[in-house]
Amino acid sequence: MQKITIKKPASKGIAIGEAFLYRQRKLEADRGLISPKATSREMGRFKDALASARRRVVELAAQSEIFAAHVEIADDPFILETVELKITGEFKNAELALEETSDEIAARFEAIDDEYLRERAADVKDVCGRVMRRLKGLSGTGVAGIDRPVILVCDNLTPSDTAGLDTSLVLGIITSEGGSTSHVAIMARGLGLPAVVGAEGITDIVPPGVEIILDAVDGTIVVDPDAQTRDSYARKAKDFGARRRALAALAGLPAETPDGRRVKLCANVGNLRDVKGAVPYGIDGVGLFRSEFLYMESQGFPTEDEQFAAYKAATQALPGELVIRTLDVGGDKSLPYFRFEEEENPYLGWRAIRMCLDMVEVFKTQLRAILRASAFGDVRIMFPMIISVEELDRALEVLAACKREVEGHGAGYNPEIKCGIMVETPAAVMVARELAGKVDFFSIGTNDLTQYVLAVDRGNRRVAASFDSFHPAVLRAVNAVIEAGHAAGIPVAMCGELAGNEKAVQLLLGMGLDEFSMTASQIPDARYLIRNRSFAEAKDLAAAVLRCGSVTQVRELLG
């Protein structure tokens, strides 16, 4: 018997069954070049394959919102233009031109530190993979050979693979790649299948046909369990089912403690599809709309009208607030149509609000679009990466100018629109009291805040183990921000990963956090935890944790 611990379960549940190893077929292009006379033929082959793939994606999009993004990729003129340039200008065959184009686009997403955006590379690879199969005369991508109940073990699954799963036979999913925001994770949650992702090397560890236990609650895989272990997990699976039913009974109820402390539970999203997917979880609104996704999907800086349409649609689909983070690119987030200069320390460089204040017209275009959308719902503006009062003042001056411009054009907007900042730098923590006097809310971004407080690059595997938001320094910074916000009479939210961590929910509640914003699927568990412990108990827990001097002590207290 062998136990393997996984850091991040992707879709909660427990399954016991036979391991089925699935290895995707690698489709590689012929490296040979073509003659100039053959370019027209190769372009024709590519266009036919693209059209065929698009027809299938449109069919899938009618069944699942996830594939709506694939339709957009299939329609993206950048792919067609890049492939055409490689065929007609570099004399590459259609397969090679497509392979290089797919790799180049996917690489831009994979280089991003934000897990949500990084996982979008899978969309590009999946669509291009469909086209490649048609170029090679192959049909289907499905997981073949499953004729009995199994737990699927593989390196990765494309959205197309996942959509084709027979859920009467697949008991759970384990992949060696991917993250909690990957499509395999999202679709597994939608199908109600237990899943863990990012289990490095799992396909080399688990023999085909062996019995395994997939514990996607605590993040454990047991290979070849003994009878006692199997029975123990069978009981745990029964208890988990009972809790799922309890969570379902809480749907629609407020996140309120037994002694009357009520907080908001909001979702982090990147587009309208995410908004629609989050609403059924009973959200109070969207605490983080990542507007950079709109820029990264475009072939140029999106126009004011394009952005207005996207923000308007999002707010009209919501029951509550829509907090739009203004453009946060640079550093690890590039744009296909804008060249960023290479920087020695990109995380400390020209990014987010710094870029926007230098490129004022780009900034104003976005702000005008947000202002116009505020006429249709509770839209709020949030500036990222603020480090000083002076920087905030400059951003607010630009916003004031945009309000005058919108008024001058006769467009409607909410003159009382709320404006806040992300607190994600040590500098913002240190001057939080001064910043709080100038905004309507704070939202703590714990991903960057942890990185900057601890001086740990979370994308660097050699030091990633030191990246821990439960470090006392990070927790004390979070507490200081909450206290500063409340002293100024403004609410404090959190939209970093810590907000959705089950071990952190009651701690943050005890610190006085007003709003938790997280991946939508985490909301039922957060609601359950908040409704089943008093605010008084949570405050006692927070006080004890804040006295801890080490991560070990913190984790021992939190259990």
Image (cartoon, rainbow, N blue to C red):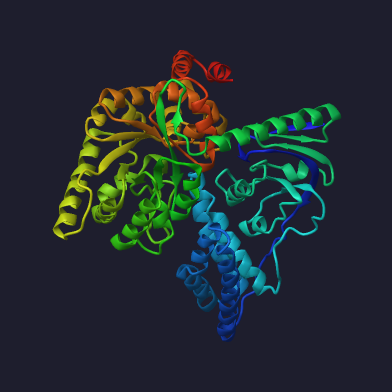
Which quadrant of the view contains residue 241?
A: top right
Where the N terminus falls, by quadrant?
top right
Depicted 323 relative to depicted 508: above or below: below
Q: Can residue 43 be seen in this view?
A: yes
Depicted 74 relative to depicted 449: above or below: below
**Residue 120 screen position, x and y as percent:** 52, 54
Relative to 325, 131 lies left or right: right
**Residue 449 screen position, x and y as percent:** 41, 32
Q: In percent of the image, x 50 and y 50: which residue is there?
A: 277
**Residue 252 screen position, x and y as percent:** 48, 39
Q: In percent of the image, x 21 and y 55: which residue is there?
A: 412
Relative to 377, 153 lies left or right: right
Relative to 207, 117 lies left or right: left
Of 452 and 119, the residue lying toward us: 119
Which quadrant of the view contains residue 11?
A: top right
Relative to 219, 289 lies left or right: left
Where the C terminus falls, by quadrant?
top right
Of 512 and 388, the residue lying toward us: 512
Q: In percent of the image, x 47 and y 55: which residue is there?
A: 273
Query: As drawn, which residue projects farthest toward the bottom?
Result: 37
**Residue 418 screen position, x and y as percent:** 26, 41
Of 313 and 487, the residue lying toward us: 313
How many labels, in total? 0
Of 367 and 77, the residue lying toward us: 367
Depicted 86 relative to depicted 4: above or below: below
Q: Is residue 351 visible?
A: no
